[in-house]
Image (spheres, helix red, strand yellow):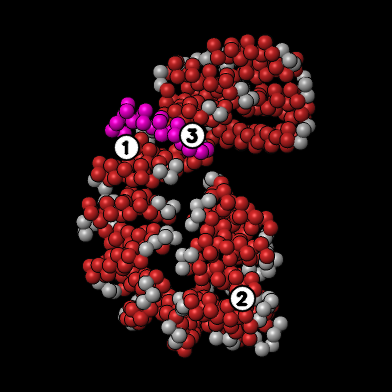
Amino acid sequence: MKQVLLFIFLLTSSMSLFSQKEAKLAQYYYQSGEYEKSGQLYKKLSDQNGYNDYYFGRFIESLLALEEYATAEAAINSQLKKMPSTVQLYVALGNIYERQAELERADETYILAISKLPNNRGQINSLGNSFTRLNKFDYALKVYEKGVELLKDESLFAYNLSDLYRRKGETEKMIHYYLRSHMADMSRITSVQNHFNRYLYGEDEYEILRSKLYEFLQNDPENIFFPEMIQWVFIQNKEYSKALRQARALDMRLSENGNRVFRMAQIASNDKDYDTAIKAFSYIIENKGQANSFYIDAKKELLKTKRKKIIQDPFHSKESLIDLKTEYVKFLDEFGRNNRTALIISALAELEALYLSNTTAAISILKNLIEFKGLNKIIQANAKLSLADYYLIQGENWESTLLYSQVDKSFREGYLGENARYKNAKLSYYIGDFEWAQEQFGILKSATTKLISNDAIELSVFIMDNANLDTTYAPLKMYAEAELLVFQNKFEEAKNKLDDLVTKFPGHTLQDDVLYSKGLIDLNQKNYDSAASYFEIVVKNHSEEIRGDNALFKLAQMQETVFEDIEKAKELYQRLFIDFTDSTFAIEARKRYRILRGDDI
């Protein structure tokens, strides 16, 4: 008996292996376009396996490729006699009629298939898939709609209906059925969001989604899926104020710890909706209490957001900066001056030095900070670089170069070291040591940080262009001195130095640089009309020179942020990336142009 069973097992196994080889060979012939051979093999495989939907289908497709319609029709009719409930065969039969331009007969056959649909989910799916493969979406929809009637459950075929309506471009129905297929499953919410991100375009379609969500919410108010999705839709449409209302409501309803509101606030802040972000961070601070895990982070982010709102407003007042400083001090009084608050301390020093012109206070703050025991090395290095900058503002060049060199030595590889070397080289440029500066900029051309590399290349070219014309370096020295005065916020002295340069060296190639620098000075002093006029002169009369693209980019930025003339800004950004394709600003100009045009970046 064992020998008989072993023989049967070996025979079955060998037959299975032989069948697999034939299937692979049939597939090879089919893909190679040898339909006569593939048809013969697929018919054999189908006969050997009783009825196999895949093998029989490929057999029919091979016949159709050979235009052997009569043979294909006979094969399907023969199969239908054996298996009359296999309704998807009618689809294949209708396709044969359609191939022969018998359209009315084909439609009759398709309708017959649907009329014979049994009360069986598998058969319904098979018939629907058969129509879908032939791109007959209307017939496939009828199949699933009848399936809903037969099985009395819309959710069973909701995904199929959604996919078909998507293919047909009927957005509202696609949304309805896709939500119907997933609405009770919170574990699928990320998948649902990804789906809509992929297939919805523009505010109008997201508005349809929001309306549908409210419709479902009215029928099922306890289902948390819908308010979660409504909040997400508000964020997609950048309606952060509405998203915040939804987030706060969910936070209170679910007794959450503020995490949802915190994340939403970060999104709003990053997208420059500072007012909404401020309200969100304030909600956490005021409602969650000091024991909450987000309390200190919310306070930090609130300070950062208020700072960005003030600094990025071209018309901000000194009073707003003083109020912000007071909030920084209150924060440090509450949480102490320690390693945990080191970044806040650095930000306060920057506020003092760069915006309140109090470098003495900034230097004192940072000198204390870098002495903290156990301070993070990167935070310490950044503090040293800022401290060196503030010493340079005060004219203490030796202290500056010493600190730059310390950071350079400690971080030979990566951004910090490269930045320290760049700052040290620029200090040499400021004081007129052009040969050493040029050598360092030459090395930094290959910096891993693109911004540093670009700046080094620009300064290297600038020195080379202007030093070669006059071995005394006199005009270049005057210009570098003026740039240092600008760095030190001595704007009137810088203007006088630039005017002296033009008087002493009329017609010098530094003319465009002088105009550009005057534009930057006026921009810093909020003399926006005057700044724009300088940049316009550079663009008009010196577009082929080194400052041409710089001035054009500044002008575009001013049109966007100061004058709020979006069309003019778009025009200038477009001109920059078209006319100055090699400019280091070309990529950013293209990005700003697309954002202003309304593209989803």
What x and y, as percent, mark residue 69? 75, 17
Q: Residue at x 33, y 81 (%)?
A: 364
> For residue 557, what is the image quadrant?
bottom right
Q: Name the residue under label 3.
A: 205
> Mark 2 or mark 1, which is nearer the start of the sequence?
1
Q: How crowded is mark 3: few (under 14 residues within 10 Å), some or many (20 or more)?
A: some
SS assignment at label 1:
loop
Q: Which of marks 3 and 1 is in front?
A: 3
SS assignment at label 2:
helix
> Mark 1 or mark 3, which is nearer the start of the sequence?
3
Q: Is residue 172 above or below residue 322?
A: above
SS assignment at label 3:
helix
Q: Residue at x 39, y 70 (%)?
A: 355
Q: Name the residue under label 2.
A: 459
What x and y, as percent, mark residue 293? 27, 58
Q: In this view, does 37 lie to the left or right of 24?
A: right
Q: Mark 1 points at which residue?
A: 224
Number of the label disc, if any, that sits on residue 265:
none
* Residue type for callout 3: Glu
Position of the N terminus, as image quadrant, is: top right
Q: Which of marks 2 and 3 is in front?
A: 2
Residue 41 within the segment the image draws in magenta: no
